[in-house]
Amino acid sequence: MTWDQEIKHQRHMAFDEGKAEGLSEGARQKAVENAKNAILQGLNDELISKITGLSVEEVANLRNSLYAESLSV
């Protein structure tokens, strides 16, 4: 492999890795958004965890932050 080919290959791999990380972060943000909506609809943490793939602890933390936000308004 020539130097130019190696550089192109490395750039392509870095781009693919960045794209995968971006997609993963987007999916997580969507899961958090869905969890917040489910909390507001009155679902329990265990069910929200199963639906979104977030841990029960993460859902509980979201619930607590939503509660804290409602108190500060």
Image: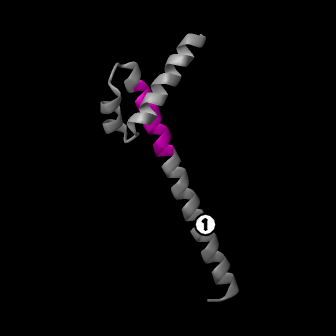
Q: Residue furthest bottom?
A: 1
Determine if the magenta segment contains residue 36. Answer: yes
Vertical placement of 1 versus 34: above or below? below
Mark 1: which secondary structure?
helix
Indicate the colouring scheme: one colour
Query: How dense is the environment of label 1, judged by Cα within 10 Å: few (below 14), some, or many (20 and up)?
Result: few
Report the residue at 48% width, 28% height from top: 62
Residue at the disc numbered 1: 14
Along the line of sight, the residue nearer the viewer: 44 or 36: 44
Q: Position of residue 34 (x, y in %)?
A: 41, 32
Residue 31 within the segment the image draws in magenta: yes
Q: Is residue 35 above or below residue 5?
A: above
- Identify which amino acid the numbered label 1 is placed on: Ala
In screen coordinates, is 45 left or right of 18? left
- Quarter holding residue 11: bottom right
Q: Quadrant of residue 43?
A: top left
Who's the residue at 45% across and 24% down the image?
Answer: 63
Relative to 8, say whether 55 is above or below: above
Q: Quadrant of the C terminus?
A: top right
Q: Residue 6 location in percent, x, y?
A: 64, 81
Q: Is residue 61 left or right of residue 39?
A: right
Say which residue appears at 50% left-offset and 21% top-offset: 66
Range of residues picked out in magenta: 26-37
Q: Position of residue 54 (x, y in %)?
A: 40, 40
- Tell me what residue is drawn at x 37 percent, y 25 percent: 38
**Quick one: 47 or 16, which is closer to the camera?**
47
